[in-house]
């Protein structure tokens, strides 16, 4: 079978939804297998149909789907894929979400709000997932929402090594764009041997995606500032953060984020800003109209493939980051 890799009696099979087939093909190539042929149909009323064109009985199944725009369709498609595998007697099903949708709704900020990230994990568990794998979840606590093993992968080594290769480490200050990213920024600072700065900001509670930037905590004057975040959505936070850094005398600002959501005006905002380079990974597909000159995209596929192989061979995913 073309989509299978066998070890002893175990059989690894890799499946891909329709949102980012290029990433799945890269992962498959790293693993030395093919993505399992799958038939997808979307009916006139929007309902999704999935059928696998090979037997999946007894397989160790990995289902890759990036929760990209249109995000709700992406999620529903992956849920249906998992259900199809469960009903076709796959032995173990791992849901691989390079970008996990609804991760920002991980807690209640005010009354009468949902915790949609928990709902997401419940849906995948109900559909038949035995295990989950994700890259740079918005918060670590989401791992505890799923009733089963969760492999949390980090893009930091890929991103930091790219930045570190082009900038003198002695000039770098790692900057967290808000208090919530301090732990991530701290890991960056450790890897690059650089000091840390934090931008204190407040969100406008009445306007979605609106941020008001306040003071910079830390020394950034004359420094090459590396702003690090888990995702760039509309680009508003990052651009305002960069402006605050330049106001405090930063020599240069680079941006590194795992997920390039790049909604709405993001590409234009970032291209027209004073930021020198924006580095993301390909956890999400970035269509041509969202690309811009300052954007660099690094592949997450080798990391994902190594993690899949560690899970398949009962190895250690944690060892990839030690």
Image (cartoon, grey):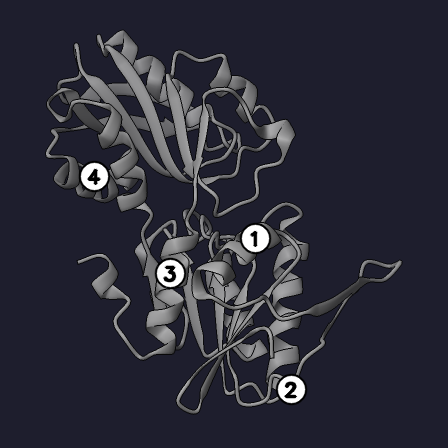
* Quadrant where the image shows the C terminus: bottom left
Identify the mark at residue 87; answer none if there is no mark.
2
Q: Quadrant of the N terminus?
A: bottom right
Relative side of 34 to 305, left or right: right
**Labels 3 & 4 near each other (Cβ < 8 A):** no
Q: Residue at x 44, y 13 (%)?
A: 273
First of labels 2, 4 by sequence position: 2
Residue occupied by mark 1: 67
Marks 2 and 4 in Cβ contact (< 8 Å): no
**Residue at which label 3 appears:** 142
Circles 2, 1 touching at the beta carbon (< 8 Å):
no
Whole-angstrom CA distance, mark 1 to mark 4, is 26 Å
Q: Is residue 266 above or below residue 104?
A: above
Residue 149 seen: no
Quadrant in which residue 313 is drawn: bottom left
Task: Single out the residue that lies furthest toward the right.
Answer: 44
Question: Does 123 sit above or below residue 55?
Answer: above
Q: Nearer the viewer, residue 184 or 84?
A: 84
SS at circle 4:
helix
């Amino acid at each position: 079978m073309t989509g299978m890799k066998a070890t002893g009696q175990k059989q690894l099979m890799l499946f891909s939804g329709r949102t980012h087939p290029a990433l799945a093909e890269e992962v498959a190539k790293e693993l030395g297998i093919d993505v399992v042929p799958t038939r997808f149909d979307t009916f006139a009323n929007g309902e999704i149909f999935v059928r696998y064109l090979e037997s999946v009985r007894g397989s160790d199944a990995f289902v890759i789907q990036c929760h990209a725009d249109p995000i709700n369709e992406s999620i529903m498609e992956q849920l249906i894929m998992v259900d199809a595998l469960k009903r076709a007697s796959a032995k173990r099903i791992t849901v691989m979400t390079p970008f996990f949708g609804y991760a920002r709704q991980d807690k209640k900020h005010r009354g009468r709000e949902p915790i949609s990230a928990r709902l997401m994990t419940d849906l995948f568990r109900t559909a038949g997932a035995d295990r989950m794998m994700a890259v740079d979840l918005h918060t670590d606590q989401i791992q505890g929402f799923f009733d089963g093993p969760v492999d949390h992968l980090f893009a930091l080594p890929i991103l930091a090594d790219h930045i570190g290769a082009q900038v003198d480490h002695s000039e770098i200050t790692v900057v967290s764009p808000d208090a919530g990213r301090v732990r991530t920024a701290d890991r960056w600072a450790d890897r690059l041997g650089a000091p840390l700065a934090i931008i204190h900001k407040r969100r406008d509670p009445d306007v979605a995606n609106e941020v008001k930037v306040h003071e910079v905590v830390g020394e950034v004057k004359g420094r090459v500032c590396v702003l690090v975040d888990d995702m760039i959505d509309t680009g508003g936070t990052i651009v305002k953060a960069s402006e605050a850094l330049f106001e405090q005398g930063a020599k240069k600002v680079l941006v590194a984020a795992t997920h390039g959501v790049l909604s709405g005006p993001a590409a234009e905002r970032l291209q027209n800003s004073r930021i020198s380079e924006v580095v993301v990974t390909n956890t999400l597909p970035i269509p041509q109209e969202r690309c811009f000159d300052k954007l660099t995209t690094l592949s997450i596929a080798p990391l994902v493939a190594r993690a899949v192989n560690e899970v398949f061979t009962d190895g250690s995913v944690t060892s990839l980051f030690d």
